[in-house]
Amino acid sequence: MKLNNNNLLKTGSYINGEWVNSESGGTFDVFNPYDNSLIAKVSDCGQKETKDAINAAADAFKIWKNYSAGERSKLLRKWYDLQIENIDDLATILTYEQGKPLEESKGEIKYGASFVEWFSEEARRIYGDIIPGHEQNKRIVVLKQPIGVVAAITPWNFPNSMITRKLAPALAVGCTCVLKPAKLTPLSANALVVLAEEAGIPKGVINVVHGHKASVIGKELTENPIVKKLSFTGSTEIGKLLMAQCAGTVKKLSLELGGNAPFIVFKDADIHKAVEGAIASKYRNAGQTCVCSNRIFVQSEIYDQFNTKFREELLKLKMGNGMDKDVKIGPLIDTKAISSVEAFVEDAIEKGAKVICGGKRNTENENIYEPTILSNVDTNMKVFKEEIFGPIAPVFKFDTEDEVIQKANDTPYGLASYFYGNNNAQIWRVAEALEYGIVGINTGLISTTVAPFGGIKESGFGREGSKYGVEDYIEIKYLCMEI
Ligand code: SIN
């Protein structure tokens, strides 16, 4: 990997301002998902290092919470500036360990940095309240205070932005953090920390623990009473487990979990725009995002026309190494991911689905799964019920608005949803009827720092980004004064 600043490549954990190896001396391997080449050996830490990190964060909290809002704001701003200055290197590291095309990685770095910029500004606006007292001689004042030590557990599909989306609001309000990044993508996390240190963020405010046994680190983070809050992005299955583990110490939680996004195209939609949106929402990161459209529903009158255009556009997407120019579809993260996608397609074909394009691994690189469209799909198939997390687009046919709303909501998940149409009344009806935290209307790209990202139902709770993003890191206290 060729970088301008080799100092960004660190393989230790980062505890109390020091890069440390695990006490056992063990390491775990990090591979490039495109060609399986070894790119790093990272310190394999466990419970002891996690405890050390929590204690360091607790000590730093005593100091950091007393920094003025302006001081915290300036340090975050500096961190943001450094991320933008180092965008090429950060993107290269990201593509090497995650596989997504370099342009997408740059997009992620900008997206990630935008949370730091946004919350550097919000840091100055953590306003309290004065409430008219309930008796003549009573005065009530509401204070907003940082919750304390925050644990953040982040996924491999966005190795940069899911970290900044949690750490930036936490730091902005005065919390300190212990981060456990995904073991498949630890290097992006470390590069961010190098820049945080350079920005002047004091020791102990951000700590990072790497380890291949996520359950050991997760257990300590969820059961240690010093940790006051856990923010997790990942699967619903693991989210439920962490939630149960946090019950013992009644931690505040933010959970951004799985999705099963419907993408509905009504017959009066602009088909070209709808296809463009379907590609943007389905094939970003080769289908490996929680907000990827999972089930595409197209009204019967335009079903064939939509599929023809969709196929035509998909065939233009270049597959390959994310570092190569013009590549739009990179590898899936690992062989487990490939097998899982294959199982979805096999199940659908067995139950009568037709492959319109794709439906197999790329012949030049086995780690890439071809962008796939399935027609003749129905609600008994895995592709209807489960999150695919890969480049497979099942296209369902529907007749009426009521039918498609019922099907779209027929899932325990409730993160993102999308629809295309041109009838104003229908747009309002459908937007209100969809049981999802996010609704994209005539757009396939809904992610932005300025909006409250998050789900309902088994997709979790809590909101990230926007003016709401600080609330999950704040305690509300009121003072009731008799005068
Ligand atoms: C995710 O997949 O978890 C996040 C996607 C996004 O922020 O757009």
Image: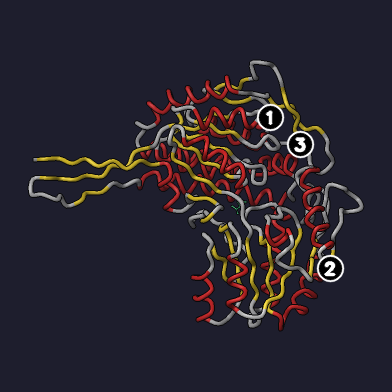
Instruction: Categorize mark 3 by other alpha carbons within 10 Å: few (<14), some (14-19), many (20+).
Output: few
N-terminal-most mark, 3 or 1:
3
Residue nearest the viewer, comparing 31 with 218:
218
Q: Amino acid at mark 1?
A: His
Residue annotated with mark 1: 212
Give the residue displayed 56% in from the left and 33% down from the top: 179
Residue 375 numbered mark, or none: none
In-image side of 399 versus 347 (left or right): left
Q: Amino acid at mark 3?
A: Lys
- Give the Cα distance between marks 3 and 2: 43 Å
- Give the Cα distance between marks 1 and 2: 39 Å
Q: Secondary structure at mark 1?
A: loop
- Residue 322 visible in this rendered orientation of the protein: no
User: From the image, which quarter does the C terminus lie in?
Assistant: top left
Residue annotated with mark 2: 354
Q: Is residue 80 above or below residue 360?
A: above
Residue annotated with mark 3: 2
Q: Is residue 143 above or below residue 11?
A: below
The image position of residue 110, as x and y in percent, is: 60, 49
Q: Amino acid at mark 2?
A: Lys
